[in-house]
Amino acid sequence: MGGDGVSRSIRIGSGQGAMAESPELMRSGLDASVDYLVCDSLAEATCSFLALDRQRDEALGYAADLGTRLELALPYVAERGTTLITNAGGVNPIAAHQLALSLAKPYGLKVGLVFADLPATGDLGNEIYLGAAGVVEALERGADVVITGRVADAALFLAPAVFEHGWAWDDWDRLAAGIVVGHLLECSAQASGGNYSGDWWNTVDPGRVGLPIAEVDADGTAVITKPEGSAGRVSFDTVREQLLYEVHDPAAYLSPDVVADFTSVQLDEVGPDRVRVSGVRGRPRPAALKGLRFRAAGWAAEATLTYSWPDAAAKGRHVLRSLRAMAEARELPVLEWWEEQFGVSGFGGPTVDDPPTDPPEVTSRLAWRCDDAASAAAVLKLVSRVALSGPPGLNGIGRRTNGGRPSVSELVALEPFLVDRAEVEGLVRVQVEEA
């Protein structure tokens, strides 16, 4: 139970839901003086980018915005006592920890590091989803800032609840309640009105975003709210939408620490922008942990072309077929093609071959994958041929370039696997250093 042995309601704030999100969004929780601000930086795709970064430079592999976030948050950590927890260490948490120590030195703060010292597998390495135990240990050792590698998203939020309330590691219902809180907060503003499918026009204001805050009691009951005066909404609907976001089996939400039954969750609006979460039930944690291997998967490029009425969709389809035919005639070694028609069938896949109405404009997208960068770039060069020799009504060609040269992207394939947790838990390393 915290440092004073007294169980109390603690306030855990969401500080980030993706690496590309603006660090300024952290301010709402910091200004609200939450006890813990948790930044979830790692989507699986993000990890693949970081694996490529580290392959190119051994000093990289952690979130590129970590320094900016630390510079913004550390004064609050030092002056208001907010503890910062982030998995921005990515695939190089040791380097991220060193950066954090250097930035925390003027404040005399303690910086924790949690990672699994794993043998490398795959072309570009691998990672294992860890649970909350390492973060709890770092907090027990007095860390003001905790930097981790791949700790599971919701587990980052579970850790402070376990630390403060003294929950046992086999108290499945309370652990599950903490995981539900983590799942509700891990995606930035989605629980406080972001991406809301209802009357979004009354809730969305990107200039006044308020990231959600959970007030967590010792029995696992929590109230989800947001900073006073911020935009958005915390309601039964916004919370339940996030509860079911990215969930396969609601009755068995797997995490490294517990299997949570989301069908047991009770949501009650208890005031303006206040939703109580209670009744959560849990079952023993899985015997295996999830891992990801990273391997090189070639190079890709893409082009988009927007055509206007009439026959916008037909023009786009004709040009994409022509580009593919030119590449095949030149025997360019394309491993995979992908076509989309935005305005007709881009989001849901092919709907109709001949739409009953002729839309005012359609954006046609063609992407391709090759074994090498030169082949991917050679296909991209063909796109310029259609500017003055294609169908009428072209309103622009979009293609990535670098100083006028075709721009291609290196791809990473993610291969999931399971591993016995006993093989991993002995490899978890926790250290806390004073800057």
Image (cartoon, grey):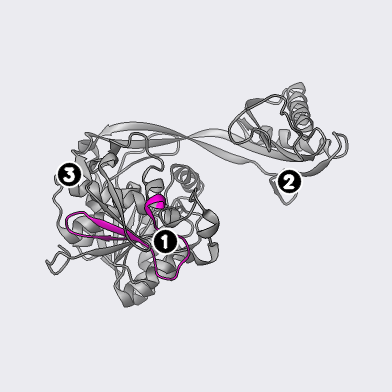
Q: Main secondary structure of the magenta part?
A: loop
CA–CA distance between discs 2 and 3?
A: 56 Å
Q: Decide: is 266 above or below 347.
A: below
Q: Please give the range of residues in magenta.
A: 214-238
Choose the circle earlier in sequence order: 2 or 3. Answer: 3
Neighbour tally class for label 1: few under 14, some 14-19, many 20 plus, Cα within 10 Å: many
User: In this image, 158 relative to 48: left or right?
Assistant: left
Q: Nearer the viewer, mark 2 or mark 3?
A: 3
Name which residue type carries label 1. Leu
Neighbour tally class for label 3: few under 14, some 14-19, many 20 plus, Cα within 10 Å: many
Residue at numbered disc 2: 405
Choose the circle earlier in sequence order: 3 or 1. Answer: 3
Residue occupying the far left of the picture: 5
Give percent across and percent down for residue 48. 47, 42
Q: Nearer the viewer, mark 1 or mark 2?
A: 1
406 or 187: nearer the viewer = 187
Is 228 colored magenta in this rendering? yes
Give percent across and percent down for residue 362. 73, 38
Residue at numbered disc 1: 211
CA–CA distance between discs 1 and 2?
A: 40 Å
Would you say residue 300 is visible in this rendering?
yes
Q: Decide: is 397 above or below 190.
A: above
Residue at screen point 40% across, 48% down = 242
CA–CA distance between discs 3 and 1?
A: 28 Å
Would you say residue 71 is visible in this rendering?
no
Give percent across and percent down for residue 73. 40, 69
Please tell me whether mark 1 sits on a helix, a strand or a loop. Answer: loop
Please tell me whether mark 2 sits on a helix, a strand or a loop. Answer: strand
Q: Decide: is 427 above or below 164.
A: above
